[in-house]
Image (cartoon, rainbow, N blue to C red):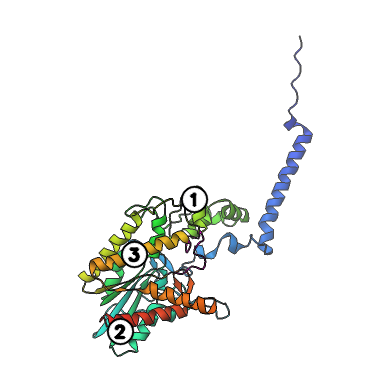
Amino acid sequence: MRRAAPRRSALRSPRSGAVLRKVLLALVGLALIFETVPRWFSIPGLTRIELNPPYLDSAEDRAFAPHPYLLYAPKPNYGRRADPASPGARSFEHGPLGFRAPEVTLTKPEDTLRIACVGGSSTYGTGPSRDEATWPARLGAALAAGPTGAVEVLNAGVPAWTSFECLTGLAFRVLPMQPDVVLFYLSTNDAESALWPDPVADNVHYRRVWPTFRPSPLESTLERSVLYLVWRRYFTDHLQQRADLGFQSKRLPEGSAGERLARYEAPAVEGPLPDQGFDNFRRNLHSMVAMTRAHGARPVLLTQAIWSDDPDSNRLLDGALRLRAHRRMTDVVRTVAAETGAPLIEVAEHMEAAARAEVDATGSQQIFSANVHLTDAGAGRLADLLALELARLGLL
């Protein structure tokens, strides 16, 4: 019996081959168009700046740099001047030692009282418009004009630092500056870390190491391709890994929880808040007070003020859960002051009452720019309060 001839494969038919060639040519044509057109015309979402933001690789644009003991720290001699035509723009300058300007010298002049201010972004001055408008700078100006003799104020605040970084920074950055008085204005960043899932004693549930980008040998060549940049920008987590987890270096859980945290929505917490984060803060405050005294300086604890325009929201920065954790951290500050005998200045009560009074009188407040960050006016009010309280406590 004669075997039937095998059927010709459809893929090998002349018609199928022609279709395949047309598809391939179309794809090549589209790739060529994609590679060339964005180079000549500005297309939203496909501009070079959007696909490969220059700040990722620009040391000049980065105000903070990795540090082997502090996670990150202000970069010495950094400066950014605001464009006067840009509303809300802010100026920043760091001195040679990496502190916010105006910076003092490493060697303290004779017959000079030096006050160091330790904290996060509300101390560094994320809200005020310029270096001279931060509350440490305003405090220095107020005390320099008084009859107490020469006074210098050092701004040792760093955005997003918790008590973990502040404790280490106190040892390696602040105490070598020979302060006579150290003001501690912090708690809210610790409140945030206390809300992170599964808190532990060394805070690694919240902090991660500074991400280090190690490009492959082909990366510089691949970056010449628009197609590659589009794929990397929109279909991978390249930008998030290098930017969102940059200097703050927060550990975001996987899945939906991580997505909620990335959008600054509060994580779900059922029942009482876990004690671990609050115990961490209390331990670190005790250590900072003891270390300050061991080096001959006088510690002063300040309660940290916070403001929310929507206290019932689920926002991580200033919503109901954050306020709940923040208030508990404030109680920790008061407890440590009582346990150690360190002077306590009730900043929170004073600043928050002033903001409420403004809202009652005018319908809005001009003291806080956002949550714990202050406006120029708010920083001036805080500096005036501290000048009066330090004199009352006999620390000047």
**Residue at horizontal 73 percent and vertical 28 percent from the top:** 9
Q: Amino acid at mark 3?
A: Asp
The quarter of the rendered structure image containing the N terminus is: top right
Q: Which residue is under mark 1?
A: 257
Q: Residues within 10 Å of mark 3 (few under 14, many from 20)?
A: some
Where in the figure is residue 190, as x and y percent of width and height?
A: 38, 61
Q: Which residues are magenta?
A: 306-319
Label 2's element? strand
In screen coordinates, is 55 left or right of 387?
right
Majority secondary structure of the magenta segment? loop
Where in the figure is residue 311, as x and y percent of width and height?
A: 49, 64
Q: Which residue is under mark 2?
A: 151
Q: Quadrant of residue 279?
A: bottom left
Q: Residues within 10 Å of mark 2 (few under 14, many from 20)?
A: many
Magenta includes 93? Answer: no
Where in the figure is residue 204, as x and y percent of width and height?
A: 36, 53
Distance, label 2 to label 3, CA atoms, is 31 Å
**Residue at horizontal 35 percent and vertical 82 percent from the top:** 140
Task: Looking at the picture, tell me which residue is in the foreground, 211 or 303.
Answer: 303
